[in-house]
Image (cartoon, grey):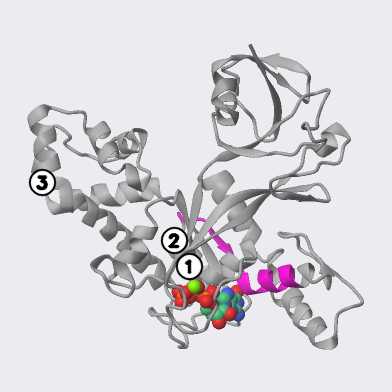
Amino acid sequence: MLIGLVGKPSCGKSTFFKAATMADVLIASYPFATIKPNHGVGHVKIECIEKEFNAKCNAQKGYCVEGNRFVPIELMDVAGLVEGASEGKGLGNQFLDNLTSADAFIHIVDVSGETDEEGKETKNYDPTLDVKMLENELDLWYLGILRKVWGTFARTIQNTKGDFAKAVAKQFSGLQVTEDDVKDVLRIGDFNIEKPNSWDDNKLKEFAHNLRHLTKPMIIAANKIDKPNSSENLEKLKTTYPDIKIIPCSADSELALREASKAELIEYIPGEETFKKTEKLNEKQQLALDKIKDNVLAPYKSTGVQEILNYTIFNLLKYIAIFPASANRLADSKGNILPDCFLLPEKSTALDFAFYLHTDFGKNFIKAIDAKTNRAVGKDYLLKHRDALEIMTR
Ligand SMILES: Nc1nc2c(ncn2[C@@H]2O[C@H](COP(=O)(O)OP(=O)(O)OP(=O)(O)O)[C@@H](O)[C@H]2O)c(=O)[nH]1
Ligand SMILES: [Mg+2]
């Protein structure tokens, strides 16, 4: 699973990426600071199941602080996108090609109104324009990919009476498009799949839009919420786009808190509303932290970064977290308690989980034991978020 951070230049993509991954990337006030994509590991936060077992876990992937389990996810920070990107403007096509493998997007929007459509410094810019621009460019990008092959593709399907959904999924598998996705798109629109050759450009555009919308779900991170005009612009954004999930955030504040926490100047758990100061802070640091507290944490209850990551994985993509564990033995062979936690799509079964762990576990599956209740469950058992299962094999 890969989450792409997208948005116009200077909106704060690299700052969000650095705050989430602590990777060393370039952050700069000039546009197109990022050229090549950055890949890194961020985390979603869930309640650890250690309490239910009266134990203290030793997470081997990710980490756990005070009962908060942080499970790794992959993030990608890319170059800024400007109008005309689908035709190669800015870093255009190169940028878009990097996005093909993403499963969902976090659209970082600068809600301060202090950067224009190209990421240059300005005043009173309307951030709702950024959403329109980005969505349009993404649609045009999909449309371009469709158009390139459509003539031949549609003719072949029509002549051979081929399976439309299957053929589209095959053609666009690189964009993470599945057969079910195509079927969903066909269900919500009026598309003549017997005669795809007869579709005009508007029909193709509608299809491209719906396919993009469904296969690249998106959330808006209303960034730079710490700035003076941001709260007003946030309301405007929410009114203009009532159907999109919009979460206010200050990537810059989250980065400052994580860096201060890493340097042991404060105690801070990502996503929390508060932090604890230590004696080591100097006056300047105290002032900077107080500002974050007053401008961000007090009014918005968190910096938003963790909430955005969690929403993307658990609400947009609908994943659930599963722990491999056995009721009478929580540790792995090295003595690590509850070492792993995996993210699986909703509606995954016990058998899916077995295959996920190892093909042999799947092939030789007999039953699974729910470690919390010590009850046996069959291969069709539907996994629940925070389940702990032991797979029994032949
Ligand atoms: N006040 C404030 N400034 C921020 C915030 N996030 C980012 N910035 C600033 O915005 C500027 C651009 O940040 P970057 O993270 O480099 O932006 P980007 O979207 O990666 O830009 P490109 O790589 O050029 O597309 C920098 O000066 C950051 O310090 C925030 O939450 N609050
Ligand atoms: Mg950048």
Element type at mark 3 = helix
Tell me the crowding category of disc 3: few under 14, some 14 to 19, or many 20 or more residues within 10 angstroms, Cα based: few
Give the x, y percent position of residue 217. Answer: 44, 50
Element type at mark 1 = helix
| Distance CA(mark 1)–CA(mark 3) | 39 Å
Task: Examine the structure image and report whether residue 264 is included in the region drawn in magenta.
Answer: no
N-terminal of the two: label 3 or label 2?
3
Instruction: Please name which of the two marks, 3 or 2, marks the residue nearer to the observer.
Output: 3
Q: Which residue is mark 3?
A: 151
Question: At label 1, which amino acid type do we have?
Answer: Leu
Total residue callouts: 3
| Distance CA(mark 3)–CA(mark 2) | 35 Å
* Residue 224 visible (yes or no): no
Left or right, 77 with respect to 154, comes to right
Residue 237 tag number: 1
Tell me the crowding category of disc 1: few under 14, some 14 to 19, or many 20 or more residues within 10 angstroms, Cα based: many
Question: At label 3, which amino acid type do we have?
Answer: Gly
Q: Where is 201 relative to 198, above or below?
A: below
* Residue interval drawn in magenta: 243-259
Q: Are marks 2 and 1 in contact (CB under 8 Å)?
A: yes
Q: Look at 67% across and 66% down and name the residue there.
A: 303
- Disc 2: residue Cβ within 8 A of ligand 1's nearest atom: no
Q: Look at 80% across and 32% down and name the residue there.
A: 331
Element type at mark 2 = loop
Residue 42 vs residue 311, the one in the foreground = 42
Task: Examine the structure image and report whether residue 245 is included in the region drawn in magenta.
Answer: yes
Give the x, y percent position of residue 163. Answer: 21, 28
Question: At label 2, which amino acid type do we have?
Answer: Tyr
Residue 241 tag number: 2
Residue 226 vs residue 57, the one in the foreground = 57
